[in-house]
């Protein structure tokens, strides 16, 4: 019979053989790392509590992540805990480390659950890891008294039980109902079955629309050029600098260049627009809104 030599099994066996630290030894190691950056003390502290990390990682296997990856994330959480632990607070390291280990594993599970970001707020994270458990409890309680909760009632009670908005419950129920599917998956077993991506609506502009837009743009450009010809050189310069530049110039800067007051430039601009309006209206009323 072949021995199971998978990496997670090997890590688990080593963790089970690690020493058990009493409170005094744990405190000495924590001080040695914090005050002296003693890497040997850090290694001993982490190794002693790897069994705790592995135990917590095993609780998240139901989310479908590989056990090896969960153990790795738990180890990272344990190392963060060791780096931030303050022995002066009088708390056992294991009590402090539990929070960091759990947070590290939860972040990993949520990052890899779906390509779509599943949850970013505290209420969404709470829902992700507690919704199914609370839902099962509520359904058992309702069944015990002969009641049956519909979907809306169930969502309302879950929101009340966990203390989160109803909209978050509805969103998370949809996210947890199934995993991601490829758009290139075939819709049926037939050889000529379409892929799901073929059913998506093409939102890009169609050929007729493109030709129509190009025609309208060309016509508008022609009308505008004709309207600009009705202006004198100074008016054309003001309109060009005020309306046709990526970054329009201010009335003050134009006044300084033309040796005019800001108010005079504004008057010339208004007069130029009035001339262009009359020219455009003479050609087509479809562009009256251009200078509105």
Image (tube, helix red, strand yellow):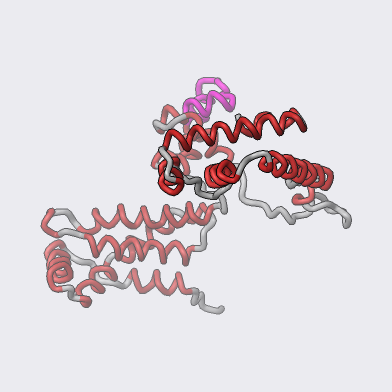
Which quadrant would residue 36 be assigned to in this image?
A: bottom left
Q: Position of residue 126 (x, y in %)?
A: 41, 41
The overriding secondary structure of the stretch rendered in magenta is: helix
What residue is rendered at 72% in x and 29% in y? 281
The correct choice, above or below, for 156 with respect to 123 in the image is: above
Q: Which residues are magenta?
A: 138-157
| Viewer can see residue 175 | no
| Viewer can see residue 118 | yes
Please name whichever residue, 245 or 6, is drawn nearer the observer in this view of the structure: 245
113 horizontally vs 104: left or right: right
Quarter placement of the C terminus: top right
Q: Position of residue 205 (x, y in %)?
A: 76, 46
Please name whichever residue, 278 or 167, is drawn nearer the observer in this view of the structure: 278
256 horizontally vs 91: left or right: right
What residue is rendered at 31% in x and 72% in y? 17
Please name whichever residue, 125 or 101, is drawn nearer the observer in this view of the structure: 125
75 horizontally vs 112: left or right: left
30 horizontally vs 170: left or right: left
Quarter placement of the N terminus: bottom right
Q: Position of residue 107 (x, y in %)?
A: 42, 54
What residue is rendered at 34% in x and 70% in y? 15
- Please say whether residue 143 is one of the residues in the magenta stretch: yes
The correct choice, above or below, for 145 with respect to 291 in the image is: above
- Please say whether residue 170 is one of the residues in the magenta stretch: no
The correct choice, above or below, for 144 with respect to 85 in the image is: above
């Amino acid at each position: 019979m072949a021995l199971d030599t998978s990496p997670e099994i090997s890590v688990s066996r080593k963790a089970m053989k690690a020493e058990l630290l009493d409170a005094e030894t744990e405190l000495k190691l924590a001080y040695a790392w914090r005050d002296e950056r003693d890497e040997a003390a850090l290694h001993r502290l982490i190794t002693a509590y790897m069994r705790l990390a592995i135990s917590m990682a095993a609780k998240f296997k139901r989310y479908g992540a590989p056990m090896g990856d969960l153990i790795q994330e738990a180890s990272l959480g344990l190392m963060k805990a060791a780096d931030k632990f303050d022995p002066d607070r009088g708390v056992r390291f294991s009590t402090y480390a539990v929070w960091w280990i759990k947070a590290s594993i939860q972040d990993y599970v949520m990052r890899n659950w779906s390509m779509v970001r599943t949850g970013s707020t505290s209420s969404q994270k709470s829902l992700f890891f507690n919704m199914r458990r609370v839902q099962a409890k509520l359904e058992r309680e309702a069944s015990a008294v002969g009641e049956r909760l519909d979907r809306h009632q169930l969502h309302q009670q879950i929101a009340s039980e966990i203390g989160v908005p109803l909209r978050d419950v509805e969103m998370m129920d949809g996210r947890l109902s199934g995993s991601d599917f490829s758009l290139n998956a075939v819709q049926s077993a037939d050889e000529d079955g379409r892929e799901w991506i073929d059913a998506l609506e093409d939102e890009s502009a169609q050929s007729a629309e493109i030709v129509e837009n190009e025609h309208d743009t060309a016509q508008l450009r022609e009308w505008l050029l004709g309207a600009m010809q009705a202006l004198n050189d100074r008016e054309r310069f003001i309109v060009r600098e005020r309306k046709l530049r990526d970054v329009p110039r201010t009335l003050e800067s134009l006044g300084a260049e033309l040796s005019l007051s800001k108010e005079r430039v504004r008057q010339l601009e208004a007069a130029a627009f009035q001339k262009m309006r009359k020219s455009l209206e003479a050609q087509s009323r479809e562009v009256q809104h251009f200078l509105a």
